Image (tube, grey):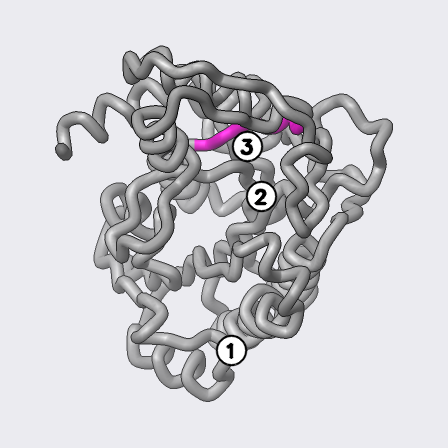
Amino acid sequence: MRIAVIGAGGQLGTALAAVLPGDVIPLTRPALDIADADAVHSVLCETAANIVIDAAAYNRVDDAERDPQTAIAVNSMGTKNIALYCARSETPLVFVSTDYVFGRDPRHDKPYVETDEPGPLGNYGASKLAGEEFVRQMCPRHYVVRTCGLYGRASSGGKENFVDKILRLGRERDSVSVVDDQWCTPTSAADLASAIAALLHTNQFGLYHATNTGSTTWCRFAREAFRLAKVDVEVKPITTADFGAVAQRPAYSVLDTAKLAAAIGRSMPPWEEALACYLQARRSDQ
């Protein structure tokens, strides 16, 4: 089996390379600009991949409000280019999407299932939802995998994930302020990669929600990270309005993962366990 991983330098791409079976062909941003349709065709043809995983994304949520065209070029049209290649070559495609396709209904307070009507609040979520629709319409053999709050180690370096950033701030400051009114499920890239690898063996194509289990807020997630890392810092809960981000975030975007668990025969670990495993691996790497 030959698996092409687009976005191989990112957090999920790095984790996928460690767990996927067969011959993994890593495609980083310098190797493939997915907004270039000709490049997508020629590069993917050259890989002769049996499966393509699209883990690339323009995920700068606030910047997407200022620059929607870049988000569309990557998350929507770039995904369309990949879906078109996979449709023509009859290659199965995995597209990694986001919980940010939800959020428009302020009354929603239970985990979203795959059949719930999406309603993104901003350009990032809208661009990823458009990418989903291209994949589902154009490529019959597809897995669309929505996840939430991804964190992991990226081989390409670049920006910090939430856990690394909050721990750094906790060591630099006497107190940190963290949003406490956004309910979600932060998800380990390692656990998501393992779930995707298992899903590939099922041939049960379709739309899946894939996160660690349970739910929390970013403030409570930060407190658990500090507790596990033994960082003594005051954590001040604030509201989304207090934080004042450019883009709106879903107040509740917990995803129901029962469909995934039924397909692969297991649930992903609880978010608390995943965080502890990440911090243990992080200490081992230092």
Tag 1 or tag 3, which sits nearer the N-term? 1
The picture places residue 34, in percent across and down from the top left corner, at: 47, 74
* Kind of residue at badge 1: Ala
* Kind of residue at badge 2: Arg
The picture places residue 207, in percent across and down from the top left corner, at: 62, 45
Label 2 CA crowd tier, 10 Å (few <14, some 14–19, many 20+): many
The answer to whether 51 appears left or right of 215 in the picture is left
Tag 3 or tag 2, which sits nearer the N-term? 2
In the rendered image, the quadrant that contains the N terminus is bottom left
Query: Image quadrant of residue 182?
Result: top right
Label 1 CA crowd tier, 10 Å (few <14, some 14–19, many 20+): many
Q: Residue at x 72, y 53 (%)?
A: 122
**Can I make out residue 165 in this image?**
yes
Question: Which residue is labeled 2 in the image?
Answer: 146
* Kind of residue at badge 3: Leu
The region drawn magenta spans 182-187
Question: Which residue is labeled 3 in the image?
Answer: 260
Q: Is residue 183 magenta?
A: yes
Is disc 3 placed on a helix, strand or loop?
helix
Is disc 1 placed on a helix, strand or loop?
loop
In the rendered image, the quadrant that contains the C terminus is top left
Is disc 2 placed on a helix, strand or loop?
strand
The picture places residue 63, in percent across and down from the top left corner, at: 59, 60
Tag 2 or tag 1, which sits nearer the N-term? 1
The picture places residue 269, in percent across and down from the top left corner, at: 43, 20
Which mark identifies residue 35?
1
**Can I make out residue 274 in this image?**
no
Q: Nearer the viewer, mark 1 or mark 2?
A: 1
